[in-house]
């Protein structure tokens, strides 16, 4: 089993702040790049007269790139080192971000998008591995809560930057590339603390998807519900009788829940004996909340309260799932499992909007809630089976 570098070898109780700042900078760049890039590129394609089908197809390259890059990330980090690989990913992501401005041929945006999101995926995976490998075991949930909070903050900041910068000219691309490049500074300063992967993972990549299924299934549900909710909640809300601004504000409330509950949920996960129980509880709350959505359409206020806590449960699946993963594995296995974790998230971001959209077409507007309840229900069933058949060993 591979071991961390000398600066992070022993699982002591102190928080490695340089490592935390480096990982937080990387994940913030990931969140902002995605939050700014997705609407920016879609609006530009719309202005150029590209059809909605082709815009959707081009946008889907993000999930495809994540699924392609994930299996190779650990190999690159094993060969070149974690921090150097992240620095190269920063450079490639920033350069390709500018490429979207200078390359006007729409068809070249397909490979460019794969390069951009592939580099972002490498940052995503290795920042997760870095923070998980260096987090004190007794404070793992708290540290990952901080990490998850900045990821949520990045997702919120990206659209805000877009609303300020607009889609015209070079400026939004320069700002996006600049934000990504800034992440290289703390990564470089903390490079001596980055964990070392001194041997290859023991298993084939796909086996890591199923090695800790409670964690990878949690992030799959997180990706499906988050991306599906962001994509289709406005449609559900306006069809339910809310104005566009009211529906958008409800979506913002859900994002606030995503943001404010990360650290409290992470701290709670440090106090429970089995994080799988907490994951099951959060998915059960998510299931109940989803089932209640069609009943709350008469009251904006009640809907907002439910979405605030519901957003916290959804984001908690990511934080607690990642913490559970880190408590089970280490070294090269942890790095490969983090890659599988992000891979599962990417699959969820592709599956969620498709399943929820199809459910709305097949069963009407309430199909939005039924499909999300179905995702949560599947996870509740899985987690109960895992707890019953494979109780946690002391």
Image (tube, helix red, strand yellow):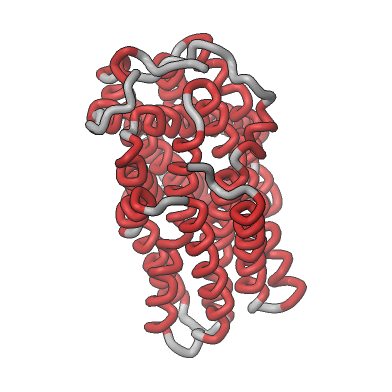
Does 227 appear above or below 322?
below
Name the residue rendered at 62%, 71% in the picture: 368
Q: Nearer the viewer, residue 161 or 305?
A: 305
Q: Hey, which residue is sitting farthest bottom in the picture?
A: 298
Q: Nearer the viewer, residue 236 or 172?
A: 236
Left or right position of 330 against 382? left
Name the residue rendered at 57%, 46% in the picture: 45
Left or right position of 4 against 237? left
Residue 40 seen by the camera: yes
Relative image position of residue 259 (x, y in whole percent) = 34, 56
Relative image position of residue 284 (x, y in whole percent) = 54, 67
Relative image position of residue 386 (x, y in whole percent) = 63, 52
Q: Nearer the viewer, residue 56 or 353?
A: 353
Does 19 appear above or below 271?
above
How many numbered circles are shown? 0
Does 54 appear above or below 367?
above
Residue 154 seen by the camera: no
Name the residue rendered at 45%, 62% in the picture: 313
Name the residue rendered at 31%, 34% in the picture: 136
Q: Hey, which residue is sitting farthest front in the picture?
A: 394
Relative image position of residue 149 (x, y in whole percent) = 33, 49
């Amino acid at each position: 089993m591979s071991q961390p570098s000398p600066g992070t070898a022993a699982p002591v109780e102190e928080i490695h702040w340089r490592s935390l700042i480096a990982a937080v900078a990387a994940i913030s760049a990931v969140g902002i790049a995605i939050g700014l890039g997705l609407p920016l590129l879609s609006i530009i394609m719309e202005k150029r007269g590209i059809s909605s089908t082709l815009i959707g197809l081009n946008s889907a390259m993000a999930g495809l790139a994540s699924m392609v890059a994930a299996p190779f990330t650990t190999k690159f980090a094993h060969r070149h080192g974690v921090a150097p690989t992240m620095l190269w990913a920063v450079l490639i992501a920033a350069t390709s971000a500018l490429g979207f401005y200078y390359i006007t041929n729409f068809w070249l945006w397909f490979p460019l998008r794969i390069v951009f999101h592939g580099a972002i995926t490498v940052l995503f995976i290795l920042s997760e591995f870095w923070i998980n490998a260096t987090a004190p075991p007794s404070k793992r949930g708290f540290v990952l809560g901080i990490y998850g909070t900045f990821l949520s903050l990045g997702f919120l900041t990206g659209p805000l930057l877009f609303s300020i910068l607009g889609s015209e000219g070079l400026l939004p691309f320069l700002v996006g590339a600049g934000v990504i490049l800034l992440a290289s500074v703390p990564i470089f300063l903390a490079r001596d603390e980055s964990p070392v992967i001194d041997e290859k993972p023991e298993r084939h990549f796909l086996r890591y998807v199923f090695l800790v299924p409670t964690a990878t299934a949690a992030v799959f549900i997180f990706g499906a519900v988050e991306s599906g909710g962001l994509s289709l909640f406005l449609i559900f809300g306006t069809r339910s009788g809310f104005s566009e601004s009211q529906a958008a504000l409800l979506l913002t409330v859900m994002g606030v829940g995503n943001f404010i509950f990360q650290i409290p949920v992470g701290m709670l996960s440090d106090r429970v004996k089995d994080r799988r129980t907490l994951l099951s509880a959060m998915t059960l709350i998510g299931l109940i909340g989803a089932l209640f959505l069609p009943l709350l359409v008469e009251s904006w206020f009640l809907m907002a309260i439910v979405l605030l806590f519901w957003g916290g449960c959804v984001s908690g699946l990511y934080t607690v799932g990642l913490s559970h993963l880190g408590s089970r594995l280490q070294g090269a296995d942890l790095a490969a499992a983090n890659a599988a974790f992000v891979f599962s998230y990417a699959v969820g971001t592709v599956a969620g909007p498709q399943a929820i959209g199809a459910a709305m077409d097949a069963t009407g507007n309430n199909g939005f809630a039924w499909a999300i309840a179905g995702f949560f229900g599947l996870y509740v069933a899985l987690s109960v089976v895992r707890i019953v058949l494979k109780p946690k060993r002391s």
